Amino acid sequence: MENEKSAYLYWTTPTRTTKYWIGTLTRKDGKYYFIHSKYASRAANSFWLKIPQFQDLEKVYESDELFRFFKSRLPYSHNSEIPGVLKKYGMEEYDDIELLIRSHGKLRGTINTMMYDKYEISGTLREQDKD
């Protein structure tokens, strides 16, 4: 497993007209970190409800294990269906962040949030969100 890996959390408005980069999840040296992007406050102004576990938009959150918010988007690592899930996403071994990226964090019925392996300004972002 590589030393550092990140995934980017996005939220899409219910009308699907705007996508906001909410923050970055990083695993480094066996610890997990989550930090909000500068766009999280804009999303909050567009009816995004802050993640209960991450209410302070300025704080860098740190944990020895994957945060509950992200863990809830994955099957349990000891689940008997894991081999099939890994095969479906072209993975040979379980890696929580890689699985979040490949599944876009949608394995357990989440709504309006998705995970990606890089920060991209896509066509669904409004022009004023590009600064």
Image (cartoon, rainbow, N blue to C red):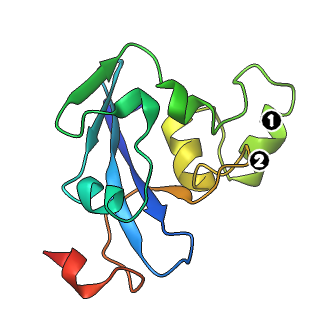
Disc 2 is placed on an element classified as: helix
- Using residue 89 as the reference point, say whether residue 47 is left or right of it: left
The residue indicated by pointer 2 is 87
Outermost residue to the right:
80
Q: Which is more toward the observer, 13 or 22?
A: 13
Q: Which is more toward the observer, 94 or 40?
A: 40
Disc 1 is placed on an element classified as: helix
Q: Residue at x 63, y 55 (%)?
A: 111
**13 w.r.t. 62: above or below:** below
Q: Which is more toward the observer, 78 or 121?
A: 121
- Using residue 16 as the reference point, say whether residue 45 is left or right of it: left
- Using residue 48 as the reference point, say whether residue 113 is left or right of it: right
Q: Quadrant of residue 29?
A: top left
**123 w.r.t. 55: above or below:** below
How far apart are labels 1 and 2 at the CA level? 6 Å
- Quarter of the picture holding the N terminus: top left
Q: Residue at x 56, y 77 (%)?
A: 15
**79 w.r.t. 13: above or below:** above
The x and y percentages for residue 47 are 43, 60
- Using residue 7 as the reference point, say whether residue 100 is left or right of it: right
The x and y percentages for residue 80 are 87, 26
**103 w.r.t. 124: above or below:** above
The x and y percentages for residue 85 are 77, 43
The residue indicated by pointer 1 is 83
- Quarter of the picture holding the C terminus: bottom left
Cβ atoms at labels 1 and 2 below 8 Å apart: yes
Outermost residue to the left:
131
Q: Quadrant of residue 59?
A: top left
Q: Amino acid at mark 1?
A: Pro
